[in-house]
Image: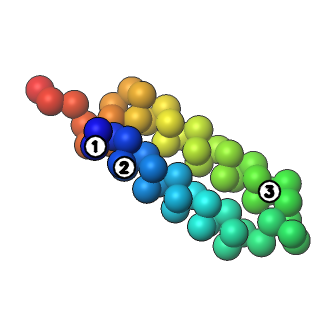
Amino acid sequence: MVNVVAGWGMANLAGLLLLAGEPARFPGPTWAAASFGVLAIALFHTRIGAFGRRA
């Protein structure tokens, strides 16, 4: 459940940063950066988890 909440929060942050990237002026680079960020956090969550694994 913690990973879901953390992932949801980061997805919202990515959306806010996407808007800050001025997609109307720079659509390609803005979408590419947001897409890469979402992919990176998704891979991190599937491999390690938002707060790490228990030993």
**Splitting the image into 4 quarters, where does residue 18 fall?**
bottom right
Extreme residue toward the left, this view: 55
Q: Quadrant of residue 51?
A: top left
Report crowding for label 3: few under 14, some 14 to 19, many 20 or more residues within 10 A (C-alpha).
Answer: few
What kind of residue is marked 2? Ala
From the image, state whether disc 3 or disc 2 is nearer to you. Answer: 2
Disc 1 to disc 3, how far (Cα)? 31 Å
Name the kind of residue labelled 3 in the image. Answer: Pro
Figure check: 25 above or below 45? below
Per the model, the C-alpha gap separating discs 2 and 1 is: 6 Å
Residue in the image at 52% along x and 62% along y = 13
- Give residue 6's mark: 2
**Which residue shows up at 28% across the image and 43% down it?**
2
Q: Is label 2 in a helix, a strand or a loop?
A: helix
> Which residue in the structure is indicated by mark 3?
29
Residue 29 x, y percent position in the rendering:
80, 56
- Residue 10 position in % (x across, y down): 47, 54
The CA distance from mark 3 to mark 2 is: 25 Å
Whichever of labels 1 and 3 marks the residue nearer the N terminus, that label is 1
What amino acid type should be assigned to the residue bearing mark 1? Answer: Val
Whether residues under marks 2 and 1 lie with C-beta atoms below 8 angstroms apart, the answer is yes
Picture residue at 77% right of the left edge, 72% below the top: 22
Q: Position of residue 16 (x, y in %)?
A: 60, 67
Q: Are there few (<14), some (14-19), or many (20+) residues within 10 Å of tag 2?
A: some
Asked if 21 appears above or below 7 in the picture, the reply is below
Residue 20 at x, y percent in the picture: 67, 73
Q: Is 51 situated left or right of 32 in this image? A: left
- Please give left or right for residue 49 compared with residue 17 in the image: left
Q: Which residue is mark 1?
A: 2
Q: Earlier in the sequence, mark 3 or mark 2?
A: 2
Residue 26's image quarter?
A: bottom right
- Residue at the image position 68 percent from the left and 45 percent from the top: 35
